[in-house]
Image (cartoon, rainbow, N blue to C red):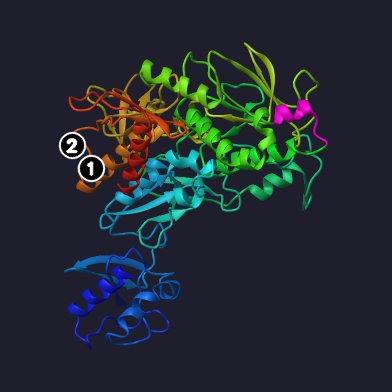
């Protein structure tokens, strides 16, 4: 109340007793109006009083939420500083115009709503560009906090930001890209509003064996009917500039049963599924009909991949079990296990050996079994050393088979290994039907008297990973069968689905965020080819280990140590995350 009273006194001193604070909006919301904000951390609105007095100023502050719900739902907000007070000019103008209608601005189509796509869309100049985000996912996820949300320390709504925002001038289409015509400069997309398909984990739906069963749509039944229901409308989206930031999927190494039976950890849906499965396993374990062996298997949680994602997930899950689940199920504490598997000889291999060894020591002390040098051979439903289950049975356990340890029963297996290119990059971005004459520019020394249309061209990719190879200006490159090279002047790539030919940054959120900021800055300046190329600046790495302990590795510096560990690193981790959000 002291802060509110102080704010009221400030307003009273700045405004005359009968000074107008705002013009009331019309009932249909058609006219613009102004409200005052004084930095109290709340949404402020206007009252039904046309003039301000000492008695009505307080009312104007306190009814802000009601006013917001009534008048702000379909408006844009622009903030302009005027002295010590801010004026918010509200108009009824929306931000969901037709993507084809932007004759005065260049149309920038961004495929993906992750670190690259979302950051770029928010940093492009709205006076020069008309950004359109095309993605099955209508929100951006702050992935460093995904493990905290899965463990229950944060709400899922606290780590997401909607792509469609009334305050931004970004258009959004909930669809998945299927193909690109570089000559017509259009992207063929398929609407996926009903089924977004953004998570990798299999849904508890119908087995593929039920082809002739299930719902019927017309003359179709079973899987054919489901595919018809899931199919969306296909249409074209034109562009002047195209940015490919579709990300990657988890790499399964073609291990039998992993794609069908494992859980992955890349999105909100995956994190919710992990949290729900942990609770299911505990409830199944306390059932009076559950045998001792099945109870032991249900309470064994396996995480494959000892990189930052897998390690932090194991640590967060360990905290969740000790802080929450063991308080509710105290008798199950001695039967619960968490095992972290990896084919490498140590966890967090990108960190220094001393920090990696410290991580293994801390996690083992907290109760996480670390099994390095282990190769996963199979993941199937059913108990170990018994016949495989005929179909998926969430009421039972899974069997995880390793080359070194044989079969073990687990209640849940989360697959958090490396990345591989998704279907769009692998299948749709390959050989070109025709050389894009108006978009491509030959690289120095690659000109030829032969007509470029007379030879076959394809998008240049990394031989091992299949990632798009971009130049130092993040432009997609082409290569021909006769050895020539070209660069696409209006097609760019960001994030995990691309690699720089030289000095490629790591596939991290930090690197992708820097790429998006760099590209937005260069596009806003209007000189993508004249400026120096992108250069990654390493700010260090942080990994949480559980029980308020973490690792922090920073670049060499005269004033700072190279590695920080323990509770000090954990405090720095939280600070860096909030600082990252503020950027």
284 left or right of 143? right
Cα separation, mark 2 vs mark 1, equals 7 Å
> Residue 100's x, y, as percent?
40, 57
Left or right? Give the position of 357 relative to 229: left
Query: Considering only vertical position in the picture, is 486 above or below 235?
Result: above
Q: Badge 1: how crowded within 10 Å, few (<14), some, or many (20+)?
A: many
Q: Is residue 490 visible?
A: no
Identify the residue under disc 1.
522
Q: Which residues are magenta?
A: 289-298
Position of residue 314 measured from the top left corner of the image (x, y, whole percent): 53, 30
Is label 1 in a helix, a strand or a loop?
A: helix
In percent of the image, x 30 and y 75: which residue is there? 35
Residue named by callout 2: 531
Q: Residues within 10 Å of mark 2 (few under 14, many from 20)?
A: few
Most common secondary structure along the magenta stretch: helix
Depth check: 407 or 440 in front? 407
The N terminus - image quarter: bottom left
Q: Is residue 253 above or below residue 540?
A: above
């Amino acid at each position: 109340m002291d802060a509110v009273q102080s704010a009221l006194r400030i307003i009273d001193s700045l405004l005359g007793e009968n000074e107008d604070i705002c013009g009331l909006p019309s009932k249909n919301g058609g006219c613009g109006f102004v409200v005052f904000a004084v930095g109290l951390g709340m949404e402020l609105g206007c009252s039904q009083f046309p003039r301000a007095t000492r008695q009505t100023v307080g009312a104007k502050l306190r009814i802000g939420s009601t006013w917001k719900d009534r008048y702000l739902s379909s408006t844009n907000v622009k903030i302009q500083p005027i002295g010590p007070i801010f004026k918010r000019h509200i108009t009824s103008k929306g931000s969901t115009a037709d993507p084809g209608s932007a004759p005065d601005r260049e149309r920038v189509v961004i495929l993906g709503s992750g670190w690259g796509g979302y950051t770029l869309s928010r940093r492009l100049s709205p006076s020069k560009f008309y950004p359109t985000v095309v993605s099955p996912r209508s929100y951006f996820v702050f992935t460093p906090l995904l493990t905290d949300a899965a463990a229950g320390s944060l709400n899922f709504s606290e780590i997401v930001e909607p792509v469609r925002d009334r305050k931004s001038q970004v258009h959004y289409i909930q669809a998945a890209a299927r193909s690109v015509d570089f000559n017509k400069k259009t992207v063929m997309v398929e609407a996926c509003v009903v089924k977004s398909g953004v998570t990798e984990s299999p849904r508890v739906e119908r087995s593929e064996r039920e082809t002739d069963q299930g719902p019927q749509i017309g003359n179709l039944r079973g899987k054919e009917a489901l595919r018809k229901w899931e199919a969306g409308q296909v249409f074209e989206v034109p562009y002047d500039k195209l940015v490919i930031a579709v990300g990657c999927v988890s790499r399964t190494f073609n291990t039998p049963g992993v794609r069908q039976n494992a859980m992955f950890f890349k999105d909100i849906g995956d994190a919710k599924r992990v949290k729900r499965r942990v609770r299911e396993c505990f409830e199944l374990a306390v059932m009076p009909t559950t045998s001792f062996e099945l109870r032991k298997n249900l309470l064994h949680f396996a995480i494959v991949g000892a990189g930052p994602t897998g390690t932090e997930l194991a640590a967060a899950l360990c905290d969740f079990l000790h802080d929450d689940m063991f308080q509710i199920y105290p008798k199950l504490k001695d039967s619960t296990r968490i095992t972290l598997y990896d084919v490498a000889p140590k966890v967090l291999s990108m960190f220094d050996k001393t920090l990696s060894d410290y991580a293994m020591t801390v996690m083992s002390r907290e109760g996480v079994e670390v099994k390095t040098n282990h190769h996963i051979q199979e993941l199937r439903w059913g108990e170990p050393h018994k016949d495989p289950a005929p179909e998926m049975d969430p009421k039972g356990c899974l069997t995880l088979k390793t080359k070194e340890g044989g079969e073990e029963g687990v209640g849940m297996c989360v697959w958090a290994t490396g990345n591989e290119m998704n279907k769009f990059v692998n299948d749709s971005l390959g050989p070109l039907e025709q050389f894009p004459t108006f978009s491509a520019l030959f690289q120095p020394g690659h000109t030829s008297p032969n007509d470029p249309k007379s030879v076959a061209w394809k998008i240049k990719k990394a031989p091992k990973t299949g990632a798009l190879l971009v130049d130092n200006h993040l432009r997609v490159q082409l290569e021909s069968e006769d050895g020539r090279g070209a660069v696409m002047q209006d097609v760019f790539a960001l994030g995990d689905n691309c690699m720089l030919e030289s000095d490629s940054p790591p596939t991290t959120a930090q690197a992708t965020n820097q790429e998006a900021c760099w590209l937005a800055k260069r596009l806003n300046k209007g000189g993508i080819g004249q400026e120096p190329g992108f250069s990654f600046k390493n700010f260090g790495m942080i990994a949480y280990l559980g029980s308020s302990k973490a690792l922090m590795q920073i670049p060499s510096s005269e004033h700072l140590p190279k590695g920080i560990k323990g509770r000090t690193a954990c405090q720095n981790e939280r600070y860096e995350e909030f600082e990252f959000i503020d950027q």
